[in-house]
Image: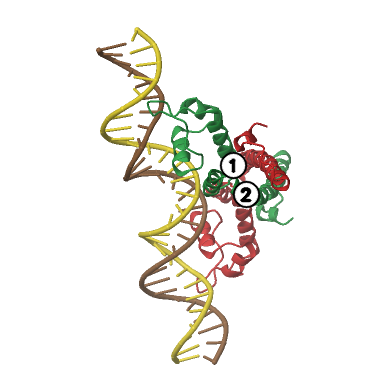
Chain colours: A red, B green, C brown, D yellow
Amino acid sequence: MTIKEVCEKYNITPDTLRYYERVGVIPEVHRTKGGNRDYTEEDISWVENAVCMRSAGVPVEMLIEYVKLFQEGDSTIKARRDLLVEARVAVQENLDKYQVTMDKLNYKISRYDEAIKTGVLSWDDYEDSKK
Amino acid sequence: MTIKEVCEKYNITPDTLRYYERVGVIPEVHRTKGGNRDYTEEDISWVENAVCMRSAGVPVEMLIEYVKLFQEGDSTIKARRDLLVEARVAVQENLDKYQVTMDKLNYKISRYDEAIKTGVLSWDDYEDSKK
DNA sequence: ATACTTCTTAGAGTTAACTCCAAGTCAATA
DNA sequence: TATTGACTTGGAGTTAACTCTAAGAAGTAT
C-alpha cells in the first residue's frame, strides 16, 4: 500500500506518516526496490494504532517508548504492559474531564435555548458555573 | 481573592491566569487600588469556566470569541448558543475517540496480563488492531 | 521604616506535534 | 523516451498554548 493510500485510509498527511516513522512512533516501513514506502499489513496496523492513540492524546513520546520496548523483544513485556496502563490512566482522566465539560455545555446550552424560546434572559452568565 | 489563591483553587499558574486575561479568555479582572488583581466571585466563575473548557480541549480562540460576544450584550445570545453547540460537537467527537482508545487499551492490557500470567506469548502485537 | 515576599507589565522563549520546503529520484503514461 | 506527477530526504518553519525573564511596584510582617 502506498503512502497516499494509507493517508486516505486514516485521514492524515504523508508528512505526518513520515514524521511518525522518522521519530519512531511506528517502526521502519517496508520499501520498494526504488526506496518508496510500501506499507505491509503489519506496517498499517502500527499506523492504525498510532493514529488511535494520538487521537486520544497519548503523547508521541510514549508511543516511541512502546515501539522501542517492542523491538527489544519479550523481556520487555512487563514494561510494555506498565506503559499501556499508564496511558490508560491518562486517557481515563481526560475522558472524565471531557464528560464534566459535556455536562456543563449541555446545561449552558439548555439555558440559552430556554432564553431564546421565551425571550427572557433571566440569568447572569457567570452563574452558570454555580451548579 | 488573590491570583495565588485562584491558582491554588484551580491548580494552574499565575502566568496562565494572566495570559488568559491578556488574550481575552476571561474578561478583565477586578484590581486593588495598587493595581494588583483581586478576583471577585464573577471573575472566579469565568476562570472556572475557562479551566473546565480548556481541560476538554476547547480552543482558547473559541473562549475568546465567547467572551467577546458576551460583552457585546443580549443581541449575541444566539451567536453564543451556536458557539457552545459547536464546542459541544467537538467535545463529543473527542469523547468518542477517547472511548475507542480506552477500549483498545483495555483489550491490549488484558492480553498482556494474560501473557504475563500464563507465560505464553501467543500473539503478534500488531494483531491487536484487528478486532 | 525596613526587609521580604508577591505582585505587575512587556516581551521573549519554550514545547509538542506537526507542516512545509528544496532539491532530487521514482513511477506511470503518451 | 519524454514528461508529468508522486515520492524521497534533511532540515527549517509553524502553531497553539503556555512559560519564563527582567525590572520594578505593591503588600505584609516586624
Q: Seen in the image, is A30 located left or right of residue C22? A: right
Label disc, if present, on residue B87 of the rendered structure: 2
* Marked residue chain, label 1: B
Q: Nearer the viewer, residue C8 or A12?
A: C8
Determine contact: label 2, label 1, CB under 8 Å: yes
Q: Residues within 10 Å of mark 1 (few under 14, many from 20)?
A: many
Q: Nearer the viewer, residue B81 or C7?
A: B81
Label disc, if present, on residue B53 of the rendered structure: 1
Tag 2 secondary structure: helix
* Marked residue chain, label 2: B
Q: Tell me where residue A84 sits by quadrant.
A: top right
Q: Amino acid at mark 1?
A: Met
Residue at the (54%, 68%) spot, across then down:
A37
Vertical side of B11 occupied by A106: above or below: below
Q: Tell me where residue C20 sits by quadrant.
A: bottom left
> Does the rendering let one see residue A71?
yes
Q: Seen in the image, is A70 located left or right of residue B100? A: left
Earlier in the chain: of badge 2 and badge 1, it is 1
Q: Position of residue B23 (x, y in %)?
A: 45, 44
Vertical side of B124 occupied by B73: above or below: above
Q: Position of residue C19 (x, y in %)?
A: 48, 61
Q: Position of residue B93 (x, y in %)?
A: 67, 51
Q: Residue furthest front?
A: A119
> Does the rendering let one see residue B120?
no
Q: Residues within 10 Å of mark 2 (few under 14, many from 20)?
A: many
Tag 1 secondary structure: helix
Vertical side of A6 occupied by B62: above or below: above
Q: CA distance from mark 2 to mark 1?
A: 9 Å
Q: Seen in the image, is D25 located left or right of residue B87? A: left
